[in-house]
Amino acid sequence: MTALDPLNAAELADDIYQVEDEFTREIFYEKYKDRFELGKDSGLSDTGIKGKTGGILLKYPHMMAVMIEGKKKTSFDGQAVFAVKGTAGLMDALTDLNAGIKNARTGGKVHQGFLDVFDSYAGKLPTLSSNIHTIHCVGHSLGGALATLTADWLKSTSGKEVKLYTFGSPRVGLEHYASKAQRSIGAGNIYRVYHKTDPVPMVPTWPFFHIPDGGEGDFLLPSGLHLKPWEFHSMKRYIKSSKGDGSQSLEWSTLRSRRPQDFLDSSVEAWLKSNSIVSFTLNSARLLSAAILWVVKKLTNLLGISVVIAGSTTFTLLDRLAMLMSKGLELAKDVSIWVTRLIKRMAQMLGIVVREGAEMTMRFIRQVFIQAHHAVSELVRQAGRTLH
Amino acid sequence: MSILDLGKACTFSQMQLEITYKGEPAPAAKVWRRVKWQKEKVDEFKTDEEGRVELPEIMERSVMQLLPSEFVVSQAIVVTYMDEEYKIWVNSKRSPEKNSELDGSDIHLKCELTDERRLVSDYESDFLTSCEII
């Protein structure tokens, strides 16, 4: 089944923001009524889905998504769309050091904040007509995380083909969840679009993983030169990127060909080896994130240790990551060199002086990770402050 | 813009309206405006003898500006004339700049109350209106 084109997917991710308010819902209705079954009224009472966010700002249930079936004899015949909006109330949770993780319904561990919102509407997802063979799940920003959880859930319960399109989505779950969801939905059915200077895909910080992290469904797009590079998180920018210079949608293959140079393993390795001074910027934070994932993968591959220690609830994820690093230092010399280099580079970025021959205690590693986390979170917050 | 408006977002740009009913100016029509960003703001105006009214811009500050979230403001204008209500404008403002409703142009609308509301897709964000954009 063919995928939505980039512009169609981006417009849905953008237009779904209109459904929260009772007045603007009508704009969504008018735009899509000829292609989709939207129910009997422009208030979307038949097709709108209410959810409850767990953040500080929006605790009340509000319409945040739609599940709509394509009209017969249109290009959407036999297809359904689940589109979900982002919500700022969850943004604090993204940078919360004590963020909990929970078991996803389909297995694997995911961010508790996202799962709580997903759980608030999962039971209200309608049963689709038997002629529906494909479901397109779409979301921007935190809506991208919710679209991911929903796509994974629908794939495991509906028996239908599911396609996932996210724009500037944060990471949703830990490695096991990410690889399992990717296998289940199918690598060829995932379109993760993000601009190079969009800060939101950088959070939550490690050890959360994207779906996918690299490969065919990973559409990294250039941001171009701009005074406010973080502005590239807005849907306005994603819509522009999906059209290029014209008014028609680009092909996915064209978007793929626009991918800017990303960090190669060799450049991560070179960065870890070098002693050059770097400050904390969006770009160096991306490089640091790539370096941490690179070392974590080395550790987990060689030691067979999982980042998450089953049954343990006393420690935060960063504690567990520090434990993993510390264990790596003790157990395997091949890897310990990289752990040491990583911690030293992180310390350098944070302005912490590490004396030659100083012992890498677990307490010290933990401290470096916590400070790095704060630095990345601050970058994302700063981006938010200047976004509007 | 006053110095107090620095750092604020424009949630409704200044708008000139000319309201007619069956081709004739609609004097003393009640113009109800609702703007919702984080909080709902409602105010009311009346047209003059020529059926004209100017809605002033609204500048707001919100905690939402501190978060990298999408800018979404709901706008609605409802005119009450001869005991009938007409929803003449429904828009989702998606950018904090002034006049972003019409991609930067000043907003001057001619509204015949008996006209049907339609979807306008010529600008960056789609909106519903029964008015003519002049």
Image (cartoon, coloured by chain):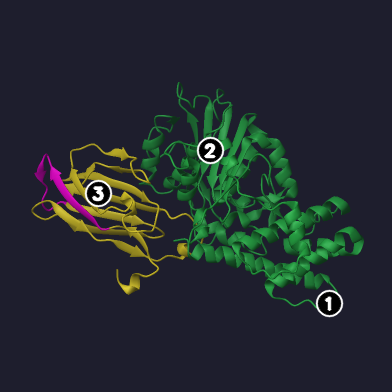
Chain colours: A green, B yellow
Of labels 1 and 2, earlier in sequence is: 2
Tell me the magenta residue range.
Answer: B14-29
Which of A121 and A242 lies nearest the eye of the viewer? A242
Measure the alpha-carbon separation of dots 2 and 3. Answer: 32 Å
Q: Which mark is residue B78?
A: 3
Residue A347: x and y in percent read 73, 71
Q: Please check the rendered image and state whether residue B22 is part of the magenta-colored stretch, yes or no.
A: yes
| Residue beneath the point at 68% across and 67% down | A372
What type is the residue that disc 2 sits on? Answer: Phe
Residue B128 visible in the picture: yes
What type is the residue that disc 1 sits on? Answer: Glu
Of discs 1 and 2, which sits in the foreground?
A: 1
A263 left or right of B131 in image: right
What type is the residue that disc 3 sits on? Answer: Val
Q: Which residue corresponds to mark 2? A: A82
Choose top left, top right, bottom left or bottom right for residue A335.
Answer: bottom right
Q: Could you tell me which secondary element the residue under label 3 belongs to?
A: strand
Residue A62: x and y in percent read 47, 49
Q: How many marks?
A: 3
Residue B97: x and y in percent read 36, 58
Q: Residues within 10 Å of mark 2 (few under 14, many from 20)?
A: many
Q: Which residue corresponds to mark 1? A: A356
